[in-house]
C-alpha cells in the first residue's frame, strides 16, 4: 500500500525566507531570553553582518563552519547568517564533553568555529590544527558589509546534523535549504503557527528537530524563547510557561509523559495552544491527561520523523478527537512525501502487515557528510521514475483508516527519549574504560515503563557500574550514557562466537554492587527515603544506595527534585543528583545549601585539623559547589572553609568590585583566624578575588603561605616580546592555535558596550527589583552573580604581587599562564597542568588528581 501527497514547489532559501519575514514584521519580537531580546529587524541586521564577515573569508565547500555558543539570539543570528552567506554550517552541542566536540570538528573538517565569549576557550581547544576561531560578539558589533544574496538554489546544501554513527564515530547528515524549509512549512501547517505565538525551545539546536523548532517560528513571524531544561529543571518549566505566556512547545513523548506526572491537579495553562510530540510511543491516556491542563483551543501534533527525511507522517489531535487508551498512530503521510512499507524481500506489504518504512520525496537529505559509499547504499534511486528514496529502518503497519502505526526500529539502532543512538558507538567507549574486556548495549523496556539503555560489560568484580558511568560521562553526551550498567564475569556467547543477546539477564538490583543497608538517621534522610521509594517503586532503600544503580533515570530525577521542592521546600537543580547520588550525600547537600542560605560569607566545610585553615573562594556564579568534590579527596590535615557572596535577600549589601569583595572576605576570615599565615585558593573568577585578598593581607603586614588559582585566565596580559613568544612556542602558529586568550588582548566587547548596554542595564534593574521584592530562585541568583562577577572582572586591574603564586592550569594552557602571570608575580610562580579542560578539572574523575596536587603544594 502506498500513499502519495502533492509537492509544494518550494523555491526559497533559508536566507530569503527569513528576510521576507523580517521585512513583513520588522518590529515583532523574534527571540527573547532573560539577558537579551531582538526584534526581526535587529536579528536580521546581526545575521547580515555575520553573513558579510563569513563571505569575505577564504572558503572551501568541503569545509563547513561550526557554531559553538549558548542557546539564544547570537546562535540564531549565526545560523541565519551562515545560511545567507551560502556557508554550510553545523551546531556543536555545548553540553557535550570536549572529546566529543573535537570528534565532530575533526570529522567535519570545519574551516571556522564561530563562538561567543563564554565558549571561546573551549572553541580554541577543540579547533584542531586547521579551524579558525571567530567571536560572534565582535562580528555583531562590527561594521561588516551587508552582503548581497549569493543567488543560492533551493537544493544547495545548508547544514550538517550529526547523529550517532554505526562505525563508532558521529555521522553527519547533509540537509538542503529546500528540505529544511519544507519541514518547517509542514510544522507551521500542522501546528497552525501564528505571528502572535511564543514558542519554547527546550533542546539544544544541535539536533535537526530542535533546528526546526527554531527556524519554523522565525519563518512564521513568531517569537522563540529558549529554556535550558537540564540546568533549570522540569519543576521550573510550568511556572516559566505561565509567566512567559508560552503558546507552543515540543517534547519527546516520554518527557511529555513525565511532565504531565508532575503537574499539580487543577493546574491550567490557557496560553499553551499546541504541543508537538514524537520520538517515542504516545498513548490515548496521555492526550486525555494533557487536555485537563490546556485551554479550549488546543492541539497536539504527533509526528514520525528522522534526520534523513524529516517529517514523514503527522496526526493533529484536538478536543474533538476520539481516542482509545492504547497507542496513537503517527498519522498520515505529509504533503510531498510518498511512503511504502516493504518486507525483507523488498516487496510492498498490505494493510495490517508489518514492513520497513520507505520514504520517497524530493525533500530528502543530500546524504551523509564525506561518506559517499554510505550515501549511495542508503539513498537509492527508483529506476521507474528516477526519484530518490530512503530506507528509514523504522517498522510500521497501515491501519484500516489509512494512518500509520509505528512499531519501533529495525536492526540495532535505538531511539531513547527522542534521540537516535547507535549502540556500537557506546560500546566503543565502554571498551576504552579500564578493565572492560567485552561490552554490548541493548534497549530494555518493561511493560508500562520507560525504555532504558542498558550496557552489559565483562569486567573484574572490583569494577563498579558507578565508576564506568563516570568514565562514560566525560566522553559521551548524557543521552548516550546507559541508565543500567550490568557488570558480569563474561558475556554469554552463541555457538558462532557472537554475543547471545537473548541470554543476557534483565537489569535488576541483583546485578548491582551491594553497599550494605544503612537506615536514615534524621528527618531529612527519612523524607528522602520516602520520596525515592515512591519514585523508584523499591522498598527499604538505604541512605548509601546509589540513585542510578537502583535504576533511576534522568526523567525520574526530574520528578525527584520536583517532589523535593513540593514536600521539603528545597529548590535544587536536577543536576545535583550527579554529584550527590545517594540519600546521605543529598541530605548533606541540602544541609550545606541551608547553611549557604543563612550564613553571610564563611561556610565551614571541615572544622577539624591540626594546621592553618584553607579558604576556598566561590566561582563566577556565586556557587561553592565545586568544593564538595575537592573536599572528598583532600588529605591535608586542616580545616576547610568556603567563601561565598551574601544572600540576595535585600538585607545584605551587594558588592560590585573585586577590591570590595576581597575586603569583606578578609574581614570574615580574620574573625576565624586573626593572624597568619593564610592559605587561599579560588577557582576561575575566584582566583581574582583571592589574588586581591593576598595583596590586602600583605599590605596589612600578614603572611600568605599559599595562594592558589585554579585555571584563572588573565585576559589582559602585557604585550609579550618576540623572545617570550618564541619561548612559549607560539610565534608563527596559526591564529586558532595561540594558547587561549592571547587573541583576546584588549577584550571589551563592543556589543556589550554599545548595542546591548541598555539591555544589560535592564537585566540588572529587573534583578534588583526581584531582589528587594521577592526571594530569588537558585537560577536567578546564579544568573545575577554571573553577570555581576563578569562586570567586576572587566573593571579589575591587577597589581604586582610580592609573594608566590601557584596556578593549576587546564590542559594545554600552562605555557600561556606562565607568560601572562610571570610579570605580575615577584615571589615566584609555579604552574601545574592537569589533563582536563577548564570546566572538567573540578569534577570527577579529574578533581581527585587536582586534590592530590593541592595536597602536595600545601605540604610544601
Image (cartoon, rainbow, N blue to C red):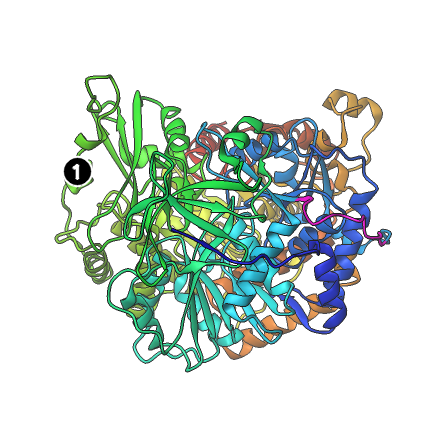
Give residue 374's position: percent from left, percent from top: 52, 29
Percent coordinates x, y for residue 243 in the rendering: 50, 76
**Most frequent secondary structure within the magenta stretch:** loop
Is 640 positioned to the left or the right of 510 in the image? right
Q: Residue at x 73, y 42 (%)?
A: 134
Which residue is denoted by mark 1 in the rendering? 514
How many numbered marks does the figure carry?
1
Q: Position of residue 358 (x, y in %)?
A: 43, 44
Q: Nearer the viewer, residue 753 or 301?
A: 301
Quadrant in the rendering for residue 563: bottom left
Please state the horizontal and vertical placement of residue 457, each as a whole percent of the image: 27, 28
Q: Residue at coordinates 33% horizontally, 32% vertically from top-left?
A: 468
Left or right: 831 as drawn, with respect to 304: right
Task: Give whichever of 428, 840 is nearer the camera.
Answer: 428
Q: Is residue 256 visible?
A: yes
Q: Which of the two residues, 377 or 24, is positioned nearer the viewer here?
A: 377
Name the residue located 30 percent from the left edge and 60 percent from the top edge: 400
Q: Is residue 747 magenta?
A: no
Q: Is residue 35 visible?
A: no
Q: Nearer the viewer, residue 858 or 796?
A: 796
Element carrying mark 1:
loop
Residue 766 sits above or below residue 812 on the image: below
Q: Residue lying farthest bottom?
A: 296
Asked if residue 754 is positioned above or below residue 848 in the image, the reply reads below
Local packing at callout 1 (Cα closer than 10 Å; few below 14, some 14-19, many 20+) is: few
Q: In the drawing, does residue 781 fall left or right of residue 500?
A: right
**Range of residues picked out in magenta:** 146-157
Examine the structure image and report whether residue 150 is included in the region drawn in magenta: yes
Amino acid at each position: 500500500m502506498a500513499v502519495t501527497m502533492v509537492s509544494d514547489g518550494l523555491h526559497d532559501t533559508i536566507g530569503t525566507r527569513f528576510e521576507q519575514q523580517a521585512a513583513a514584521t520588522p518590529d515583532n519580537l523574534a527571540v527573547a531570553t532573560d539577558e537579551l531580546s531582538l526584534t526581526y529587524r535587529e536579528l536580521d541586521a546581526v545575521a547580515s553582518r555575520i553573513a558579510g564577515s563569513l563571505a569575505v573569508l577564504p572558503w572551501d565547500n568541503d569545509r563547513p563552519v561550526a557554531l559553538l555558543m549558548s542557546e539564544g539570539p547570537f546562535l540564531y543570528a549565526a545560523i541565519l547568517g551562515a545560511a545567507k552567506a551560502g556557508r554550510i554550517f553545523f551546531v556543536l552541542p555545548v553540553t557535550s564533553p570536549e572529546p566529543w566536540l573535537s570528534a565532530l570538528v575533526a570529522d567535519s573538517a570545519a574551516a571556522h568555529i564561530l563562538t561567543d565569549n563564554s565558549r571561546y576557550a573551549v572553541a580554541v581547544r577543540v579547533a584542531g590544527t586547521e579551524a579558525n576561531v571567530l567571536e560572534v560578539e565582535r562580528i555583531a558589533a562590527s561594521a561588516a558589509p551587508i552582503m548581497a544574496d549569493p543567488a543560492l538554489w533551493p537544493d544547495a546544501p545548508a547544514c550538517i546534523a550529526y547523529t550517532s554513527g554505526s562505525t563508532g564515530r558521529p555521522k553527519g547528515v547533509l540537509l538542503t535549504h529546500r528540505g529544511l524549509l519544507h519541514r518547517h512549512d509542514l510544522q507551521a501547517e500542522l501546528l497552525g503557527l501564528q505571528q502572535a505565538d511564543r514558542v519554547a525551545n527546550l533542546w539544544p539546536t544541535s539536533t535537526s528537530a530542535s533546528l526546526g523548532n527554531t527556524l519554523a517560528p522565525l519563518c512564521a513571524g513568531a517569537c522563540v524563547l529558549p529554556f535550558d531544561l537540564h540546568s533549570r529543571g522540569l519543576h521550573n518549566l510550568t511556572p516559566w510557561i505561565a509567566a512567559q505566556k508560552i503558546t507552543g512547545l515540543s517534547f519527546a513523548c516520554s518527557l511529555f509523559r513525565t511532565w504531565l506526572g508532575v503537574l499539580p491537579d487543577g493546574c491550567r495553562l490557557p496560553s499553551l495552544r499546541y504541543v508537538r510530540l514524537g520520538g517515542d510511543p504516545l498513548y490515548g491516556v496521555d492526550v486525555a491527561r494533557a487536555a485537563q491542563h490546556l485551554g479550549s483551543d488546543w492541539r497536539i501534533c504527533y509526528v514520525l520523523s528522522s534526520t534523513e527525511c524529516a517529517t514523514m507522517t503527522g496526526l493533529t489531535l484536538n478536543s474533538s478527537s476520539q481516542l482509545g487508551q492504547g497507542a496513537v498512530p503517527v498519522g498520515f503521510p505529509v504533503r510531498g512525501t510518498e511512503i511504502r512499507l516493504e518486507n525483507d524481500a523488498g516487496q510492498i506489504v498490505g494493510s495490517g502487515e508489518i514492513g520497513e518504512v520507505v520514504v520517497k520525496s524530493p525533500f530528502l537529505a543530500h546524504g551523509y557528510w564525506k561518506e559517499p559509499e554510505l550515501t549511495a547504499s542508503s539513498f537509492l534511486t527508483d529506476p521507474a521514475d528516477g526519484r530518490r528514496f530512503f530506507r528509514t529502518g523504522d517498522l510500521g503497519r497501515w491501519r484500516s483508516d489509512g494512518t500509520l502505526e509505528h512499531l519501533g526500529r529495525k536492526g540495532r539502532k535505538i531511539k531513547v527519549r527522542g534521540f537516535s543512538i547507535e549502540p556500537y558507538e557506546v560500546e566503543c567507549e565502554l571498551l576504552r574504560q579500564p578493565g572492560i574486556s567485552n561490552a554490548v548495549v541493548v534497549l530494555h523496556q518493561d511493560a508500562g515503563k520507560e525504555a532504558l539503555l542498558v550496557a552489559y560489560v565483562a569486567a573484574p568484580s572490583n569494577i563498579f557500574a558507578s565508576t564506568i558511568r563516570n568514565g562514560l560521562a566525560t566522553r559521551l553526551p548524557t543521552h548516550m550514557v546507559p541508565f543500567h550498567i550490568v557488570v558480569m564475569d563474561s558475556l554469554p556467547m552463541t555457538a558462532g562466537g557472537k554475543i547471545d543477546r537473548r541470554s543476557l539477564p534483565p537489569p535488576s538490583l541483583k546485578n548491582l554492587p551491594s553497599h550494605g543497608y544503612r537506615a536514615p538517621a534524621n528527618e531529612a534522610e527519612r523524607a528522602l527515603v520516602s520520596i525515592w521509594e515512591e519514585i523508584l517503586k523499591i522498598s527499604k532503600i538505604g541512605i548509601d544506595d546509589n540513585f542510578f544503580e537502583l535504576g533511576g533515570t534522568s526523567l525520574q530525577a526530574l520528578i525527584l527534585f520536583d517532589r523535593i521542592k513540593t514536600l521539603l521546600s528545597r529548590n535544587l537543580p536536577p543536576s545535583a543528583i550527579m554529584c550527590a547520588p545517594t540519600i546521605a550525600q543529598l541530605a548533606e547537600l541540602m544541609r550545606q545549601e541551608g547553611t549557604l542560605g543563612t550564613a553571610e560569607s564563611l561556610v565551614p566545610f571541615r572544622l577539624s585539623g591540626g594546621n592553618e585553615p584553607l579558604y576556598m573562594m566561590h566561582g563566577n556564579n556565586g556557587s561553592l559547589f565545586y568544593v564538595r568534590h575537592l573536599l572528598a579527596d583532600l588529605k591535608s590535615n586542616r580545616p576547610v572553609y568556603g567563601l561565598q557572596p551574601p544572600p540576595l535577600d535585600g538585607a545584605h549589601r551587594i558588592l560590585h568590585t573585586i577590591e570590595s569583595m576581597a575586603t569583606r572576605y578578609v574581614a570574615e576570615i580574620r574573625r576565624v583566624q586573626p593572624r597568619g599565615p593564610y592559605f587561599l585558593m579560588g577557582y576561575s573568577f575566584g582566583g581574582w578575588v583571592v589574588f586581591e585578598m593576598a595583596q590586602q593581607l600583605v599590605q596589612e603586614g600578614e603572611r600568605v603561605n599559599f595562594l592558589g588559582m585554579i585555571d584563572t585566565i588573565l585576559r589582559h596580559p602585557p604585550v609579550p616580546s618576540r623572545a617570550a613568544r618564541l619561548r612559549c612556542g607560539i610565534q608563527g602558529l596559526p591564529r586558532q592555535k595561540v594558547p587561549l586568550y592571547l587573541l583576546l588582548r584588549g577584550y571589551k566587547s563592543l556589543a556589550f558596550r554599545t548595542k546591548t548596554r541598555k539591555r544589560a542595564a535592564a537585566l540588572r534593574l529587573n534583578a534588583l527589583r526581584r531582589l528587594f521584592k521577592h526571594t530569588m530562585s537558585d537560577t536567578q541568583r546564579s544568573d545575577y552573580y554571573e553577570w555581576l562577577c563578569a562586570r567586576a572582572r572587566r573593571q579589575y586591574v591587577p597589581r604586582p604581587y610580592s609573594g608566590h603564586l601557584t596556578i593549576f592550569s587546564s590542559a594545554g594552557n600552562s605555557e600561556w599562564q606562565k607568560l601572562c602571570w610571570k610579570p605580575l608575580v615577584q615571589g615566584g610562580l609555579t604552574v601545574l597542568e592537569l589533563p582536563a579542560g577548564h570546566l572538567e578539572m573540578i569534577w570527577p574523575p579529574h578533581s581527585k588528581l587536582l586534590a592530590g596536587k593541592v595536597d602536595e603544594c600545601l605540604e610544601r
